[in-house]
Amino acid sequence: MSGRLPRIDRSKLRTWPRSGEARRFRLDQSGRLPDPAGSFAEFVECLPSVFAGGDLREVARSVARARRAGRPVLAMVGAHVVKTGCSPVLLGLMERGMLTALAMSGATAIHDFELACFGDTSEDVGDGLRQGSFGMWEETGSWMNRATREASERGEGMGEGLGRHLVERSAPHEGESLLATAYRLELPATVHVALGTDIIHQHPEADGAAIGAASLRDLDGLAGVLTDIGEGVVLNLGSAVVLPEVFLKALTMARNLGGRTDGLTIVNCDLTSQYRTRVNLLDRPARECSGRALQLLGPHEILLPLLGGLILAEAAKPA
């Protein structure tokens, strides 16, 4: 041996003949170039059936299977899902009976409410921060705080109260609102607020007691949905912190009351994988509910329309 680097004796290395054991990839799992004139079903068949391609199909099958069996499908919706133009995908699934309940953060509710009332949402935070005007739009703060206060006085959750408010005032774009559509379809819709995180908390009309009471009522409502979530599906769409934390508490409440939670399929759809979604959704709950955990990573504006179409395609197949 020369030099300082140790060497192995290659003549002593062993090899084995290739056997028929299963490999991680086969040619028949490959994708194909889609025909631009083909149907959506033909496009789906062009997707590779491994890794994310296989997981995407499995999520769609899980949702379709749950609905055929009359089991619930809950969508937990983060704000960026609405801000990236994906609400129509969820609205279509709600209208077709593929989603049976919604949960959202306070920020999601604000973007949904503004789209229903004005047809646009979101602002330049930096510019508004310089002027001290960020989040201080009068109509948004006044109307949403008033609707929340009314919900608290009526013993409603915030989701129901905001949806009712949009429907009763015939908001110009009511049909594009998740909250209004859930109210019209009589689907549970809950809003989960962390005080101080939403722009409407900055406004003079903000009533902490009313916000707290209405959002706490929605925690009870989400726990109620989860008491019969067994063999159903939970889709976490773009919430990295608030909804995974709320879900864990609501699921605990449901199990404390002896709810039916076994066989649950939990799916995280987001741009990246985060600690809370991994631990509070895909790890502990799936394990304790004897369920399955699936994850789809990618931009909402591409992933969710594709998933929505796949769900409808699976639902249309013979049982």
Image (tube, rainbow, N blue to C red):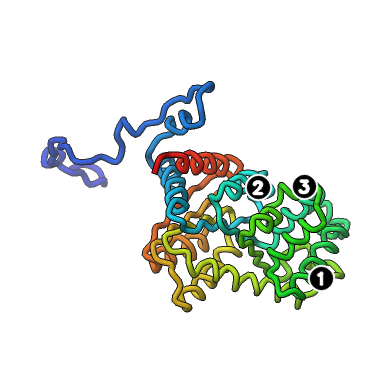
The answer to which of marks 1 and 2 sits earlier in the sequence is: 2
Residue 27: quadrant of the picture: top left
Circle 2: element type: helix
Q: Give the CA separation, mark 2 to mark 3.
A: 12 Å
Q: How crowded is the residue under tag 2: few (<14 C-alpha within 10 Å), some, or many (20+)?
A: many
Q: Amino acid at mark 3?
A: His
Q: Nearer the viewer, mark 3 or mark 1?
A: 3
Relative to 261, residue 91 above or below = above
**Tag 3 near tag 1, CB within 8 Å:** no
The secondary structure type at the circle numbered 1 is: loop
- Crowdedness near tag 3: few (<14), some (14–19) or many (≥20) residues, C-alpha within 10 Å: some
Label 3, on which residue?
173
Task: Find residue 305 and report its horizontal and vertical position in percent.
Answer: 57, 41
Question: Looking at the rendering, in which quadrant would you find the N terminus?
Answer: top left
Q: Which residue is mark 1?
A: 206
| Residue at image location 47% in from the left, 43% down from the top | 315
At a point 47% along the width and 64% down the height, the residue shown is 229
Indicate which disc residue 33 carries. Answer: none
Q: Position of residue 71 (x, y in %)?
A: 46, 58
- What's the amino acid at mark 1? Ala
275 left or right of 288 in image: right
Crowding around mark 1 (Cα neighbors within 10 Å: few <14, some 14 to 19, many 20+) is some
In this rendering, which labeled residue sits more in front, label 1 or label 2? 2
Q: Position of residue 177 (x, y in %)?
A: 71, 51
Q: Earlier in the sequence, mark 2 or mark 3?
A: 2
- Residue at left offset 61%, top offset 45%: 92
